[in-house]
Amino acid sequence: MKIELLPHKLPLKHTFTIAHQSRDVQDTLIVKLQGADGLYGLGESTTNPYYGVTLENMQACLAKVADEVLAGLAPMHPETLWSITEPYFKDNPFAQCALDIAAWDLYAKMQDKKLYELLDLNPASIPVTNFTIGIAPIPKMIEKMKEVDWPIYKIKLGTDHDLDIIKTLRKHTDAVFRIDANCAWTADQAIAYSGELAKLNVEFMEQPLPREDDEGMKKVFQFSELPVIADESCISEQDVERCQGLFHGINVKLVKAGGITPGLRMIRQAKSLGMKTMVGCMTESSVGIAAIAHIAPLLDYVDMDGAMLLSQDIADGVKISPDKVHFPDRPGTGAILI
């Protein structure tokens, strides 16, 4: 096998701001994994300054894997390839994710199946994705909601007027809200806010406290009037069991976890522990979003609006509406570069 690394810049429709960063353009890396007979798979991972992930360190990591491992291997089951290459990705699961998604895409194409068919999943059971509204002046947040009429909004919080934001937005829509504080609150804030947010038709709170505040999360888990979902607290497989008793569910980010392979294991483990499951995106193009869509039948919630936030996509893949996810009539993930 050989790979081609294709860096791209994804322009956003609006400045996207969360509690610890803002951006107008998202850098992303597409991995093209070449098999036999002209077949290839596409994978993707975006960069992220919060986690120290750059195009340069992803490319360097993948180039090393290509030279030292992939050149001597024939296409194989993605789980086997993930295990073989894992030692090279200890410090860069984002790069590992891009390769893993490409491997699943290639392998499904080799079987002439859509990925959800390969995984024996029913696309009719995919939950409706939320549409994310980043932090901005309240009039701008209202404008963004009106621009995309959607039944579920994820509202990014982490300001000094978070309750005012939700109260004001609620006046403009009956849609379900999910809120994501991206580690910005204290335990006492989260507990106090939960009662008010519950009255405002908020479904759950995502990652209200910093990752390391387990003691605070114990209090929130016990006293919150809303379910709490882990994001930054559940990066890898090792984190799932630790989240039991601190969160009611986990949000798996494929890029943080290292791809579909560990993502599937995390989902199964969370379910076995009685926790809700969600997969979220990191503003990927339709290459990364397609991968999420194919495993979405396993989930209680999904956040796969990344390509919808772009002013220009680099790929064609799944088409998402409030009623249905439309898969292209192509094997693998169905994603192609345009």
Image: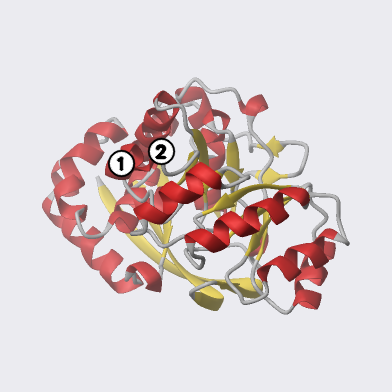
Q: Residues within 10 Å of mark 2 (few under 14, many from 20)?
A: some
Image side of residue 81 versus residue 54, left or right = left
| Residue at (79, 47) in percent of width and height | 151
Is 228 in front, or is 318? 228
Left or right of residue 82: residue 208: right
Q: Is residue 20 above or below residue 243?
A: below
Looking at the image, residue 97 sits to the left or right of residue 253; the answer is: left
Q: Which residue is mark 2?
A: 245
- Of 2 and 90, the residue lying toward us: 90
Q: Amino acid at mark 1?
A: Glu
In the rendering, at what x and y percent does residue 150 appear? 79, 51
Residue under circle 1?
237
Residue positioned 75% across, 44% down in the render: 321
Q: In which quadrant of the rendered image does the C terminus lie?
A: bottom right
Circles 2 and 1: CB atoms closer than 8 Å: no
Q: Secondary structure at mark 2?
A: loop
In front: label 2 or label 1: 2
* Callout 2 amino acid: Gly
Q: Position of residue 331 (x, y in %)?
A: 52, 33
Of mark 2 and mark 1, the one earlier in the sequence is 1
- SS at badge 1: helix
Give the answer, above or below, for where 226 lies relative to 29. Answer: above
Q: How many numbered discs sit on the rendered protein?
A: 2
Q: Is residue 36 visible in the rendered structure shown here?
A: no
Write the residue at 49% across / 44% down. Answer: 221
* Residue 29 on image: x %, y %: 41, 63
Residue 149 appears anywhere in the view? yes
Would residue 95 appear left or right of 110 to someone viewing this image? Answer: left
Q: Position of residue 17 (x, y in %)?
A: 59, 74
